[in-house]
Image (spheres, rainbow, N blue to C red):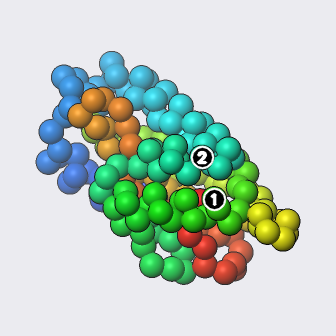
């Protein structure tokens, strides 16, 4: 099954990389792959720190202007304005602490993806009620014109049934 999932992602990303101009000479080459992977790992770490701090503006800054979040059991959130508003509303209502170790990371030119397994605790700010959750996620990143990486697609699910939630 693991092999099938990888091939599916490759089949989806390959046509995109073939039509995507590189933002810098040699982008995605073996010479820059290690740098690109390190930058994405740093992005993931800073993303998690921003979530734990409840810094909705900083969390939203990790998304591209045209990003989409595919929320489980709910409508997708499209565009940085709606993403920013959704993240702000979530952080007003909940504290969020998560761990999201990267299980797979691939860079292909100006696109990359991570596959993670995550676990989190969500605490209702009004009631103090805590909910533990876990699941899996895939994030697709696009290199920006300044050479940085941003999330363009955020897909996540839960390991167990839960009420629909907006992405933290």
* Quadrant of the drawing holding the C terminus: bottom right
Relative side of 53 to 116, left or right: right
Counting residues from the start of the chain, the first of labels 1 and 2 encountered is 2
Please indicate, yes or no, whether residue 9 appears anywhere in the rendered image.
no
Which residue is at the front of the view, 23 or 14? 23
Classify mark 1: residues with Cα within 10 Å, few (<14), some (14-19) or many (20+): many
On screen, residue 127 versus residue 162, left or right, reads right
With respect to residue 89, does 74 lie above or below? below
Where does label 1 land, which residue?
91
Q: CA distance from mark 1 to mark 2?
A: 8 Å
Check if mark 1's residue and mark 2's residue have beta carbons within 8 Å: yes
Q: Which residue is mark 2?
A: 55
* Residue at x-position 56% and y-position 69%: 166
Say left or right for 124 vs 82. Answer: right
Q: Residue at x 71, y 55 (%)?
A: 96
Residue depicted at x 53% and y 31%: 42
**Residue 107: where, in percent of width, then height?**
37, 38
């Amino acid at each position: 099954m693991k092999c099938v999932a990888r091939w599916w992602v490759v089949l989806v990303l390959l046509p995109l990389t073939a039509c995507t101009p590189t933002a810098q000479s040699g982008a995605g080459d073996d010479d820059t792959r290690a740098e690109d992977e390190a930058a994405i790992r740093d992005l993931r770490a800073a993303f998690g720190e921003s979530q734990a701090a409840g810094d909705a503006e900083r969390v939203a800054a990790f998304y591209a202007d045209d990003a989409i979040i595919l929320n489980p059991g709910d409508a997708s959130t499209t565009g940085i304005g709606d993403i920013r508003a959704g993240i702000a509303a979530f952080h007003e209502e909940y504290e969020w602490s998560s761990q999201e170790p990267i299980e797979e990371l691939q860079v292909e030119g100006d696109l990359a993806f991570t596959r993670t397994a995550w676990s989190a605790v969500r605490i209702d700010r009004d009631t103090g009620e805590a909910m533990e959750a876990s699941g899996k996620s895939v994030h697709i990143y696009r290199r920006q014109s300044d050479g940085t990486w941003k999330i363009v697609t955020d897909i996540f699910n839960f390991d167990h049934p839960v009420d629909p939630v907006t992405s933290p």
